[in-house]
Image: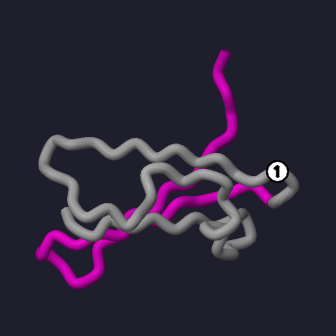
Amino acid sequence: MKDLEARIFDDDGNDYTDRVGVLWPKLPAPSLYPGQTLHLKLTPSLGDKRPGRLLVRWRDGRRNVQEREFWLSYHRVT
């Protein structure tokens, strides 16, 4: 996978990426190899709406548009 990019959206569908306090590692990432994992740390800014979903895009030569959407959950199991 090459050129990994992540965009974050709030519950209303508005782009939230620029309002995130910390998104680590900084993206786009140049590459990800088979079997390698990428853990994102997301720290939203206080006072803003909560991020609702994460959209990840990449290239690996199989299709023109490659992306996957993840809905974020804030439920904690203790």
- Does 43 appear above or below 6? above
Q: Position of residue 7 (x, y in %)?
A: 52, 68
Q: Looking at the image, how many numbered discs can be counted on the residues?
A: 1
Q: Position of residue 20 (x, y in %)?
A: 66, 59
Q: Which scheme is used to colour this image of the protein?
A: one colour
Would you say residue 54 sits in the magenta stretch?
yes
Q: Residue at x 58, y 48 (%)?
A: 42
Q: Residue at x 37, y 67 (%)?
A: 28
Q: Position of residue 54 (x, y in %)?
A: 53, 60
Please state the extent of the stretch shown in magenta in the rendering.
49-78
Q: Label 1 is placed on what type of residue?
A: Leu
**1 left or right of 46 in image:** left
Per the image, the residue denoted by label 1 is 46
**24 left or right of 3 in image:** right
Please name whichever residue, 78 or 35, is drawn nearer the observer in this view of the structure.
Answer: 35
Please name whichever residue, 11 or 18, is drawn nearer the observer in this view of the structure.
Answer: 18
